[in-house]
Amino acid sequence: MPSLGVARSHWPVVAWIRLKLPPAPAPMMLTPGVPPPPQPPLDILSPNPVPTDARKRVYAFEEDHDDWTVRLVWDADDPELLEAECRAPYYDRRLPPSDVPKFWAAVKTLIAPIGPLPVEAADPRP
């Protein structure tokens, strides 16, 4: 899973979850023209520019935990996906199995305003 934008944490991604968002309602157009770009699904997401492509609209949020960081990423070009990354200072291994449920719980807490979302893919699954 490629990481978009610039992460505050430079640790590698040791676990990730890709969540399927419900389709957004079509914007109401008061004048003819191109519809406005979609808005991020969560208020905590803030613009996170992609240095290699100034046209991309990527939003991200990072939350530090004891030994790792949770990063939510949403790309306006793919508005029905929300990605969660677990970044930790493990350069030679994956997230320890004891921390996987903690990572999933942290993601569920962050997406609570949207409600439960279906998981499209994840590595690892609890």
Image: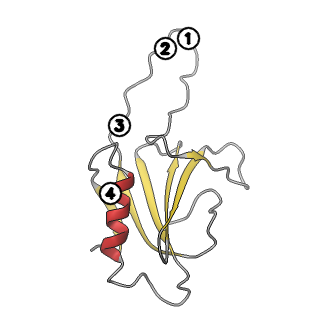
Q: Is residue 97 above or below residue 22?
A: below
| Residue at 39 percent of width and 53 percent of height | 110
Q: Nearer the viewer, mark 3 or mark 4?
A: 4
Identify the image's colour scheme: rainbow, by chain, secondary structure or one colour. secondary structure
Instruction: Inspect the image, locate mark 4, and give the three-letter code of the amino acid beneath it.
Output: Lys
Q: Nearer the viewer, mark 1 or mark 2?
A: 2
Q: Which residue is mark 4?
A: 108
Under circle 3, the secondary element is: loop
Q: CA distance from mark 1 to mark 2?
A: 7 Å
**Residue furthest front in the image:** 66
Task: Find disc 2 in the rendering and name its residue.
Answer: 29
Q: Residues within 10 Å of mark 1 (few under 14, many from 20)?
A: few
| Residue that badge 3 annotates | 23
Three-letter code, disc 1: Pro
Measured along the vertical axis of the image, is residue 23 above or below residue 103? above
On residue 32, which mark appears?
1
| Mark 1 in CB contact with mark 2 (< 8 angstroms) | yes
Reading the chain from its start, which is encountered first: label 2 or label 4?
2
Amino acid bearing label 3: Pro
Secondary structure under the numbered disc 1 in the rendered image = loop
| Mark 1 vs 4, N-terminal side | 1
So how many labels did they put on this image? 4
State the residue at coordinates (68%, 42%): 55
**Residues at marks 1 and 3, CA–CA distance in whole angstroms:** 23 Å
Task: Check if mark 1's residue and mark 3's residue have beta carbons within 8 Å.
Answer: no
